[in-house]
Amino acid sequence: MSELAVSGLAKSFGAVRVLRDLDLVVPSGSLAAVLGPSGCGKTTLMRIVAGFETADAGTVALDGRIVAGPGVHVPPERRRIGIVPQEGALFPHLTVAGNVGFGLPRGRQRAARVDELLALVGLAGYGERMPYELSGGQQQRVALARALAPDPAVVLLDEPFNALDTGLRAAVREDVRKALFAAGATAVLVTHDQEEALSMADLVAVMANGRIAQAAEPAVLYSTPADVGVATFVGDAVVVEAVAGSAGATSSLGPLQLRDARVRGPGRAIVRPEQIVLGPADDGDCIVGTVVGTVFYGHDALVRVSVPVPGGSVAVSARCSGLPPDLAVGRAVGVRVVGPVTFFPAQ
């Protein structure tokens, strides 16, 4: 296990600045997810950490040992970094055991290590199979075992679940998470999938404009985002114009309880869909809105409701368990917000 520390990292390709003074610390033995949209610099960050690219400025350190920095570039093969690429990328001509043991010294210890890792990822007894005999999820677990085989300081996972079916993805994510924890590995997962990052990681780092906009535990990131950009990228969010005062805030969704009671004046509040509760339209404590649509997901549904605002109306989403049978389009409903919200004063 090793702590990964990235400090002041910068990288440009021609006139395009991809990374800008980026800082990130991944504690030893933890799993961090680097989350961001396509083109934000996630892959470039990973390639610099792995040693496949050189940074223009900044440092990368493993347990305090600088492996990339001014005048320093430790080759990839000497950094003790394991990589799990997209879609596994197994050697098709090697058995499962051959893939896992690739690069390890031959002998009894090699065979024992391969068996140990296959058991760790739930594939004991699969050593003699060929990659084409495995499912996509099994191939990803073999790729993880191969990355863990040489006991790396850090494991990098580059969007490894993209090619898996939706139903399989959650199960494989859980298997990988358990295997990394059992191995005591320090790991970095690069992804654009918010659910994946929040469900797997100990630490989620959101990238925007080549920097880390916020790095925090998943629950902290979701409940107290650093800015509106982070809030709207990490999970669904309803952004509401509001005015904060000593008793909370007033808004088009009614009164709001604030996480920070010290804020004052106009600004924007972040309301999560699960905080929006729908009820009877004649409830005097609610704002009256009109149902404009419902998106059903099976385990829950997002109900779109139009609520009046000065000069018009705005549609907000309320998360409801199952499919509410009485919320047909055009129906008037009461809308209220429960629980504290994060508020950003106007600049």
Image (tube, rainbow, N blue to C red):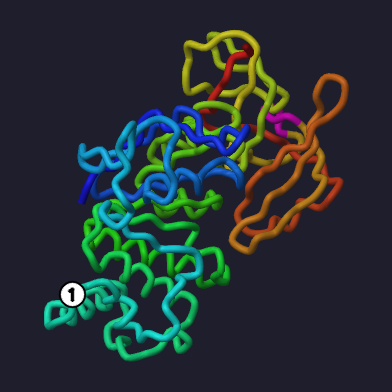
Q: Residue 190's spot in the image, x, y percent?
A: 47, 51
Task: Examine the image and state in which quarter residue 27 appears.
Answer: top left
**Magenta stretch secondary structure, dominant:** loop
Q: Which of 134 and 89 is in front in this view?
A: 89
Residue 140 falls left or right of residue 101:
right
- The count of marks equals 1
Compared with residue 76, is residue 70 higher up or lower down, i.e. above or below?
above
Give the residue furthest to the left.
108
Q: What residue type is labelled 1?
A: Pro
Residue at figure coordinates x 49%, y 77% from the top left: 136
Membership of 133 in magenta stretch: no
Membership of 285 in magenta stretch: yes
Residue 296 falls left or right of residue 202:
right
Mark 1 Cα-neighbour bin, 10 Å: few <14, some 14–19, many ≥20? few
Residue identified by numbered label 1 = 105
Compared with residue 11, is residue 159 higher up or lower down, i.e. above or below?
below
Task: State whether residue 147 appears in this view.
Answer: yes
Q: Residue 249's spot in the image, x, y percent?
A: 60, 17
Q: Nearer the viewer, residue 250 or 146?
A: 146
Residue 254 falls left or right of residue 59:
right
Q: Give the range drawn in magenta.
A: 283-287
Q: Residue 82's spot in the image, x, y percent?
A: 32, 59
Residue at figure coordinates x 57%, y 32% from the top left: 17
Task: Examine the image and state in which quarter residue 59 appears.
Answer: top left
Q: Residue 231's spot in the image, x, y percent?
A: 57, 34
Compared with residue 203, is residue 103 higher up or lower down, i.e. above or below?
below
Task: State whether residue 230 appears in this view.
Answer: no
Q: Name the secondary structure under disc 1.
A: loop
